[in-house]
Amino acid sequence: MKKYNVKFSKFLLAVAFVFIAIHQAAASTFTFTNPAPITINDFGPASPYPATITISGLIAAILDINVVLNGLRHTFPTDIGVLLVGPGGQKVVLMDGVGGINPITNVNLTFDDEAASGISTSAISSGSFKPTNAFPGADSFDPPALAAGPYASLLSVFDNTLANGTWSLFVRDFSAGNGGSLGGGFGLQVTTPELTTPEPSTFMLYGLGLIVLASLLRRRLR
C-alpha cells in the first residue's frame, strides 16, 4: 500500500507539472495598433492629443509591455516629449529631451525595459531603447488632467495591471521653431498569460485526458 501511495504521489506531481507547463506555454505577446498619423505641432500639444488604443478581451494581468512609435519625423528631435498613460492611470515618459538637434525622418522606435540602453541625447535612430527622460521633473504635459504627473521612468509600472481599456499617448513639442509627425502612429506589444477566457471544451479535454491517464496508472499499480 505504501509503495502504491508513493507512486501515486509521483503521478500527482507529474500532473502538476503538466498544468504548469500548459500555463507557461499559454503566455503570448499580442500587438495592438493605431496607425493613424500624429502631427507634432510646433511648441504645443500634438494632434490628436492624445492618440488612443482601446484593448478588450484580456483576462490576465500584464507580464510585459513594449511601445512602438512608427515613422517619427522631426526637425529638432530633442524638443519631443512622449507620455503613455494606461487604463489604470499609470504613466511613464517614453522620451523627452533626447535625440539631439539633427533632423530625423521615418525613424521607428520600440520602448522596452529590457533594451540594452536608453536613447542618446545627441543622436537618434531606429531601434529598441529603454524609456529615456532627460528632464525628469522639469517638463509637464498639457491638460487634460490625465496627462499630469508624477511620471514613472519604466514600463514595468504597468506590470500586474489589466490591459483592458483605453491607452493614451500624449505627444508634445516643448520648444518653439520646429515640428514633425508620427507618420505610422503607435502600437502596444502586450504579453499576458492568456488572451481570452479559455474555451470550456479545452478544459474538458485536459480533464478527460488526465482521468484516462489516472485510470491506466491505477491499474498498473495494483
Image (cartoon, helix red, strand yellow):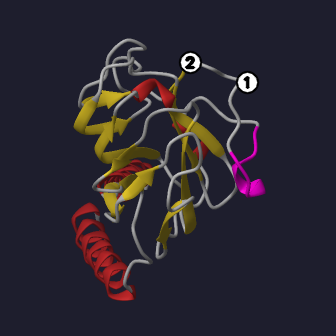
Rate crowding at label 1 as few (under 14), some (14 to 19) or many (20 or more) other CA atoms within 10 Å: few
- Identify the residue under disc 2: 134
Task: Determine whether, in the image, residue 85 is placed left or right of residue 205.
Answer: right
The image shows residue 161, relative to residue 118, as above or below, that is below
Element type at marker 1?
loop
- Quadrant of the snapshot with the N terminus: bottom left
| Front in this rendered view, residue 129 or 161 | 129
Left or right position of 209 against 148: left
Q: Quadrant of the rendered structure where residue 140 is?
A: top right
Q: Which one is nearer the viewer's eye here, 129 or 24?
A: 129
As drawn, 103 above or below 14: above
Rendering quarter of residue 124: top left
Distance (Cα) linking label 2 and label 1: 10 Å
Name which residue lies at 36% across and 55% down. Answer: 187
Q: Residue at x 39, y 68 (%)?
A: 195
Q: Which mark is residue 137?
A: 1
Q: Residue 114, which numbered label?
A: none
Q: Is residue 121 left or right of residue 110?
A: right
Q: Residue furthest front?
A: 177
Does residue 104 appear to the left or right of 144 in the view shown?
Answer: left
Mark 2 neighbour density, 10 Å: few (under 14) some (14–19) many (20 or more): some
The x, y position of residue 41, in whole percent, is: 49, 48
**Residue 12 visible in the displayed image:** no
Where are the magenta residues, as a range? 142-149
Q: Residue at x 45, y 44 (%)?
A: 64
The chief SS type of the magenta part is: loop
